[in-house]
Image (spheres, rainbow, N blue to C red):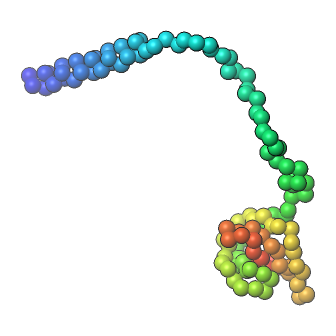
Amino acid sequence: RRNYSMKKTLSITAALALTLSLTAVASADPISGTVSDTTAPAPISVEEPIIKPEEVVLVPTPMIELTERTYFYNAPNGQKLGALGAQKIDTTGNRQDVVFGGEWVEVYTWLGKAWIYVE
């Protein structure tokens, strides 16, 4: 008998909550004033271009795919700053050949520009 009474109380509470929420929606103020069509995109007005002509990349810099941990340096043959895991990274386009093969390539890292040695 107690279980039946609790179910009935919960049913009445849920019905009352639903009724109150419908009443609140129905009693909301109607829209007044001018309604405009917003299907057309709003015009964008900027004083200067978002992308300036000098910022357009005409010749993208080559990417390098690292297949193993690679250390990066502040300069060719310079101080070691950290290491990069296997990944594809973007280069700045600056390179320095090494006499005995390989080259130093300047890349972008989370610490800024740095150099890696590539064979």
> Where 98 sits versus 66, above or below?
below
Q: Quadrant of the N terminus?
A: top left
Give percent across and percent down for residue 78. Answer: 76, 85
The residue lying furthest to the left in this view is: 1
Give percent across and percent down for residue 28. Answer: 43, 15
At x 32%, y 17%, the residue is 20
**10 or 31, which is in the foreground?**
31
At x 54%, y 11%, the residue is 32
> Where 49 sits versus 94, above or below?
above
Please state if 82 lies on the left or on the right of 57 as rendered.
left
Please state if 52 lies on the left or on the right of 113 as rendered.
right
Please state if 76 lies on the left or on the right of 109 as rendered.
right
At x 66%, y 78%, the residue is 82
Q: Quadrant of the C terminus?
A: bottom right
In this rendering, the count of numbered labels is 0
Give percent across and percent down for residue 114. Answer: 75, 74
> Where 14 sits versus 73, above or below?
above
> Where 61 sits versus 10, above or below?
below
**Which image quadrant for residue 6?**
top left
Give percent across and percent down for residue 84. Answer: 68, 72
**35 or 40, which is in the foreground?**
35
From this viewpoint, is residue 65 visible? no
Please state if 27 lies on the left or on the right of 20 as rendered.
right
From this viewpoint, is residue 41 visible? yes
**Which image quadrant for residue 117?**
bottom right
